[in-house]
Image (cartoon, rainbow, N blue to C red):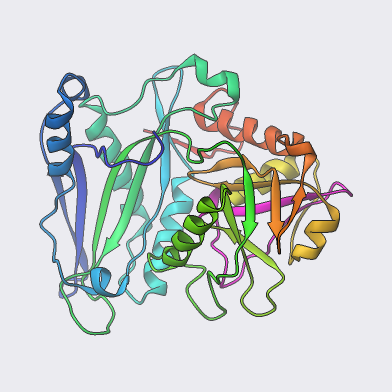
Amino acid sequence: MAFNLAMYPVSYVAQFNPAAGTWDEQWFQADSITLAELSAMDDAKRAEVYAQRNRFPLPLVNYTTQYALGCFEGMKAYPHKDGSLSIFRPDRNAKRFYDSMKGLYAPPFPEDLYLKASVEFLKRNRELGYVPAYDPAWEKDNFAGASAVYVRPFMYSEGAIGIGSSKAPYVIICGTTVSSYFKGANSKAVITDRIRATPKGTGWIKCASNYVVSSLAKKEAEEAGFMEVIFLDATDRKYIEEGSSCNIFFRLKSGELVTPALGDTILPGITRSSAIDIARGEGVKVTERKISIQEVAKKCVECFVTGTAAGVTPIESVTWKGKEYVFNGRKPGELGAKIQAILKGTQYGSVEDSRGWNLTV
């Protein structure tokens, strides 16, 4: 399933009112078709419903459509065995979205409003059946292929033309059901010559423009037979930064777990932060610092990437300048698997949420 355009019927839209200094909120319900009714339709009719749900009465020409001046979030809500639904660390998404909009010189969306709207979004769509039911079979592979609700809040500029900053942005929240993100016969990664982010740029903001280069590099990697692409820093061209849409970790022969230190070129991933906390809770030495591709080639015994979509996904090898460096005999590493089991178990409620990360809807 992964990502798809099978959008839920109810969406949230708010626009900043510069004169009043407030956000004007609206709910858009494209239809009242339940999931059961939708599932009974033929493919053509179902496609018509999804197409209608993906239409919004918003300005066509603006800073977002013309110049990619916009940002977004990605978070998931997880069904539990007892029938409840929880969002994983939405307060962190709310803070990052606030920071992203502020970084783009747009009026930032209040964190409390973000949380309130996200919860209400899930409640309204759940009433129409649009939440996957918990499946005990998911436990067999530590929820690697489990379904969840993917919630996508994003900023969209008011109508505008010419280089400028948004003064009256919209914030939209929509969503769909998703499952595992990475698909393919291997989990190989390759170092790209492309540059994702530069110092004093927007690498730390979850903005739309960052993903153009990532999309191109990932496409090139996939055409060459790799699952993922890895970016090096723009200045020295030797330090690992991140993947196409995920942060990255390396376990060294010494047992140390290393992930690139945050700066203005690396996105502060929420799954990244969670993986660090879990690893330290298991007694692992975790270091956030620069790590060169040369050090990875000599000392790395396990590699994995993290993200809302990726979860904790093992990387079997990294290819650099035509040479492949294989980790752990191409098998998922023990540490990454343990972090994945605790992370996913917490998200789906099979492991006690001792850190208070879940917000029940």
**Number of numbered markers:** 0
Along the horizontal axis of the image, is 144 left or right of 162?
right
Is residue 282 visible to us here?
no
Instruction: Indicate left or right for 274 with 256 as reference.
Output: left
Magenta span covers which residues? 245-271
Q: Residue at x 18, y 80 (%)?
A: 161
Place of residue 321 in the rendered image (x, y in percent of width and height, measured from the top left): 71, 64
Q: Which sits in the foreground, 118 or 155? A: 155
Image position of 31 with respect to 68: above or below: above
Report which quarter residue 159 is drawn in: bottom left
Give the camera-side residue of 132 and 88. Answer: 132
Image quadrant containing the N terminus? top left
Q: Position of residue 299 (x, y in %)?
A: 85, 54
Q: Is 147 displayed left or right of 293 in the figure?
A: left
**Residue name at image x 68 percent, y 41 percent:** 278
Which of the two residues, 163 or 84, is positioned nearer the viewer here?
163
Find out whether residue 152 is within the magenta segment.
no
